[in-house]
């Protein structure tokens, strides 16, 4: 009898162990940590926003859902008058003007702007870390059409000083400053004062600008620490008969002697004005590029240390004006 009871108890204990094990395994889940996708938005502003802290007046704002982005690149094109303001919201309903953060103009070495100046066509950068959404809006009287293209990126923030360092002796961290600071390029003295605002060094221009009529290789770039990058191409005037341009990313394993194509890292066949992008970053979902302005081709790959953009131009007497080619390195 005792042996039988012992056997029954052992079976009950075994069933309990199995039951607990099944429930524990059902409750333990493992998720994948993924890089958030780059987000984009584009639209037109033609009128003044009469609701600056709430839902914008129709056609007075272009909005972007940031989905974790902490850095925003903005391009303005079109013919318009009226200053443009950058706003953000954390709760999704109440909008606040980002007046305390400098808006950096890629085409200028001046200090940061409080707003985007009336009629100004350029590319701007601003920090939006922690916000749910951002928007560009016209809070003053508007005429014409301002076309806005935005790209939100996960990147490091802008480094900036609110004002120039005052004359005299100052201590910045562990460095003592006296008089006006200068910097030197190579062995040639340079007395240019350090700028009051410094653009994030992970955002650079390739220098591939100007009117292009034949296929050419862009300037060689050096990736020092990043896993990938978003290359933003701002294409201006396009002329000729059936003009075409395809832009692709190449890498080099021998510091630029021989080159290879980064697989699928290419735009669509471009034929018109617009802003187009190529993102190269590990483990993202591949997205084929299109001819729609503001779109980005996405390729799951590591960006080589030595790389460049190759521009293949076709058609009869084609001409493409490259206004700017900007690189946003991604760590």
Image: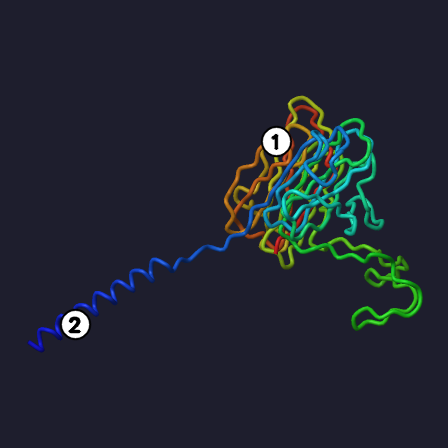
- Look at 88% across and 63% down and name the residue there: 181
- Look at 67% across and 40% down and name the residue there: 150
Which residue was labeled with disc 2? 9
- Element carrying mark 2: helix
Q: Image quarter for residue 47?
A: top right
Residue 294 is left or right of residue 179, and the answer is left
Figure quadrant of the N terminus: bottom left
Where residue 13 appears, as percent x and y from the top left, is 21, 70
Q: CA distance from mark 1 to mark 2?
A: 71 Å
Task: State yes or no: discs 1 and 2 in contact (Cβ < 8 Å).
Answer: no
Where residue 164 appears, as percent x and y from the top left, is 87, 58
Where residue 202 appears, as percent x and y from the top left, is 69, 54
Where residue 143 appears, as percent x and y from the top left, is 80, 27
Residue 210 is left or right of residue 280, and the answer is right
259 in relation to 181, above or below:
above
Residue nearest the observer in this picture, 104 or 281: 104
Q: How is this picture coloured?
A: rainbow
158 in relation to 61, above or below:
below
Give the mark, 1 or 2, whose residue is nearer the N terminus: 2
Residue nearest the observer in this picture, 96 or 100: 96
> Label for residue 292?
1
């Amino acid at each position: 009898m005792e042996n039988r009871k012992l056997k029954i108890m052992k079976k009950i204990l075994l069933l309990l162990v199995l039951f607990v094990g099944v429930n524990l395994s059902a409750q333990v889940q493992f998720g994948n940590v993924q890089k958030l996708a780059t987000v984009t938005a584009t639209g037109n502003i033609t009128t003044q926003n009469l609701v600056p802290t709430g839902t914008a007046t129709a056609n007075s704002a272009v909005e972007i859902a940031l989905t974790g982005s902490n850095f925003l690149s903005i391009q303005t094109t079109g013919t318009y008058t009226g200053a443009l303001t950058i706003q953000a919201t954390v709760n999704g309903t109440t909008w606040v003007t980002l007046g305390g953060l400098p808006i950096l103009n890629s085409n200028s070495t001046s200090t940061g702007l409080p707003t985007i100046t009336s009629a100004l066509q350029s590319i701007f950068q601003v920090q939006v870390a922690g916000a749910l959404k951002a928007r560009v809006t016209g809070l003053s009287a508007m005429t014409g059409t301002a076309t806005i293209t935005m790209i939100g990126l996960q990147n490091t923030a802008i480094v900036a000083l609110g004002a120039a360092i005052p004359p005299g002796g100052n201590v910045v961290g562990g460095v003592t400053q006296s008089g006006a600071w200068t910097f030197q390029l190579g062995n040639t003295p340079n007395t240019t004062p350090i700028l009051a605002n410094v653009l994030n060094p992970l955002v650079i221009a390739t220098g591939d600008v100007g009117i292009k009529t034949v296929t050419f290789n862009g300037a060689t770039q050096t990736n020092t620490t990043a896993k990938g990058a978003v290359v933003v191409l701002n294409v201006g005037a396009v002329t000729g008969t059936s003009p075409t341009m395809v832009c692709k990313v190449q890498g080099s394993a021998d510091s630029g002697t021989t080159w290879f194509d980064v697989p699928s890292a290419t735009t669509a066949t471009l034929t018109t004005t617009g802003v187009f992008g190529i993102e190269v970053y590990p483990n993202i979902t591949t997205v084929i590029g299109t001819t729609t302005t503001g779109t980005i081709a996405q390729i799951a790959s590591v960006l080589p240390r030595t790389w460049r953009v190759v521009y293949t131009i076709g058609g009869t007497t084609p001409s493409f004006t490259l206004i700017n080619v900007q690189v946003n390195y991604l760590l």
